[in-house]
Image: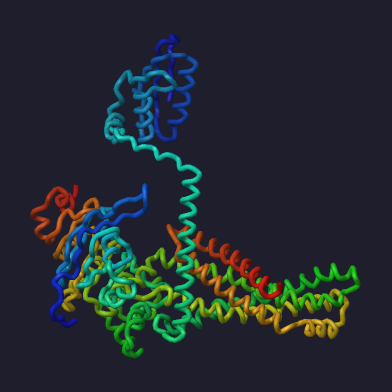
Amino acid sequence: MTPKAELPAHAVSVRDLQVAYGEGDDMRPVLDGVNFHVQRGDVTCMVGGSGCGKSTLLKSIIGLVTPRSGTIDLLGHDVLSMEPEEREPLLRRVGVMFQYGALLNSLTVGENVALPIQMHTNLETSLITELVRTRLHLVGLDDTENLMPTELSGGMRKRAALARAMSLEPEILFCDEPGAGLDPITAAGIDQLLMSLNRNLGTTVVVVTHELLSIERLDGGLLMLDGGRVAYSGTAREAREAGGAGLREFFHPG
Amino acid sequence: MSINTPSHHSSAVFRLQGELTVLTVSSISARLRQQVLESGARELAIDPSGLTRLDTAGAVWLRQVTESGIDGARLRLDSPLPTAISAFYEGVSFPVASAAVPAERPRASFLERFGDRAYIDVNAFLSFLHLVSDLTWAGIGELWRRRGVRPGTFTEQATRVGADGVSIVAVILFLIGGVSTLQAAAQLRQFGANVLVADLLAIGITRELGPLMTAIMVAGRSGSAFAAEIATMKFTEEIDALRTMAIDPLRLIAVPKLWAMLLTVPLLTVMADFMGLLGGTVTGVVSLDIAPVTFVNRVTNALLLKDIVTGLIKSISFAWAITMVSVYRGLQFRGGAAGVGDATTASVVSSIFAIIVLDLAWGLLFYL
């Protein structure tokens, strides 16, 4: 990806974000005034205990959850004030890797990776096929394009999902718990892939995780959520050394 | 476990021996209660020195009876727990009673509950209307645009709905044709009008039973499959993934299904009409002693183009309704695996309801 001129410095900028589930008496606040930003070209980990609102924050940014108030600036666009059809061109610049891959089970691996390309470009079939093979090669899944997602292992499925998320070469890539449920070697492999995408293509990477090893490997920005609020925002390295009560518990459990 | 009760009633000693675990605690509790009742003692001492094993259930019970007593009698430990058991007892982390007891929510009145239900149902109906308009327009728009639908999916869906359903629809309609003939003959025979069975069969099958039974079969076979497929896709976040790829799930998933239904259900209905008439003719000829030529002639004379066309119009509307309802039910999915089952069931029930209502509406329009 070639760098573009006059791009805003922040890939993501979130202000006073409030999200709640339910209505009336049953309303349960999940995010309560979240503020943070992610610099373009950075790798950032969103961390926090279960139920702290990490996944909700991610879903709010990519438009799957509607916040009650606040602003979300994604690649220079105010996401919440956009009409659904206005979001389409923006979403083409964004890649999302879901926790369990979310590959379409009725399509082959190759068709899954080709889907966004087919839907959003006019490329010839032969070129799409070659592009798909290149993407699968990038994630170490050569010769799997004709397999069904159910024929893949958990780690392979995640790598295929990464290939699909990268198919349109997005400017920003969001990953929801990429290492969850994987053995340490496979999880490390996924982290290395994310690092190489960031290094070689300049992709901004935002990873939701609670894997300590993953945070250390990615060694970038760190956003820690606690009780629906930002408990820490800075770099993982500083957090490990400085650390308030919550951070200490996170980096030195037990 | 054994319980020793001294003869005097003011106090007693209960000697716990053996295991106090989840398997023995209820029988111990019951026997203790019985002893308290029989002895009439107001204060009891528990001697736990004979205990050989304690688990969490036993520890919770022991704490409960020593703190709160049992049936109005106070209980206390008259000797420490054996060392091995004491270590376990001390290690059990008992929950601390919360000082702030959450206020019990007042039970909603009938009017409140009625209002809540009405609010939910009206919203559900409005979102159904949204889906109906979105999907219908997407179905029309994609005929020209062809960007949101993957090549090949229409053929795949048409094969599933149409070709794969041919045999079961054919068999069912053949049998229904036969049954209709027998039922009609049973009545008409009384008036010596056996031969009119053919007329009744032709009208009944083409106007009503052909389109209706085909639609019900399709709702059960394909409508339920649509709802289950879409609900599962929601469960596995496939629908969310499509949205984040700026791909409209309605266009990619539902439009080919709508096209397939609108094309194949009328074709299935034509085949069903033919099979119903065939089944009725075979039954009439075999069991009613009507000459084959006479029966076929009466059937063909009674057949009106209008009846076949109205049957086809009905079948197109049924196909449209089944698709809308099953896609809506699939997208309404909430929860886990049970939610997929609920979506499937709701899709079949609602589709059949919609088919019957539409059938009545068409009946009023065409034949009143």
Residue at the top extreme, as displayed: B8
In-image side of B292 versus B103 (left or right): right
Q: Residue at left 18%, top 74%? A: A198
How was the colour assigned to the protein in this rendering? rainbow
**Image quadrant assignment for residue B297:** bottom right
Q: Is residue B231 visible to us here?
A: no
**Image quadrant assignment for residue B362:** bottom right
Q: Position of residue A153 (x, y in %)?
A: 35, 69
Seen from the viewer's position, the closer of residues B357 and B95 is: B357
Q: Residue at left 70%, top 76%? A: B207
Q: Position of residue B320 (x, y in %)?
A: 55, 74
Q: Position of residue A191 (x, y in %)?
A: 21, 68
Q: How many marks?
A: 0
Q: Is residue A171 visible to us here?
A: yes
Seen from the viewer's position, the closer of residues B130 and B278 is: B130
In-image side of A164 versus B162 (left or right): left
Seen from the viewer's position, the closer of residues A145 and B152 is: B152
On-image quarter of the N terminus of chain A = bottom left
Q: Position of residue A3 (x, y in %)?
A: 15, 80
Q: Taking A239 as reference, is B135 above or below it?
A: below
Q: Residue at left 21%, top 61%? A: A46
In-image side of B325 versus B76 (left or right): right
Seen from the viewer's position, the closer of residues B118 and A10 is: B118
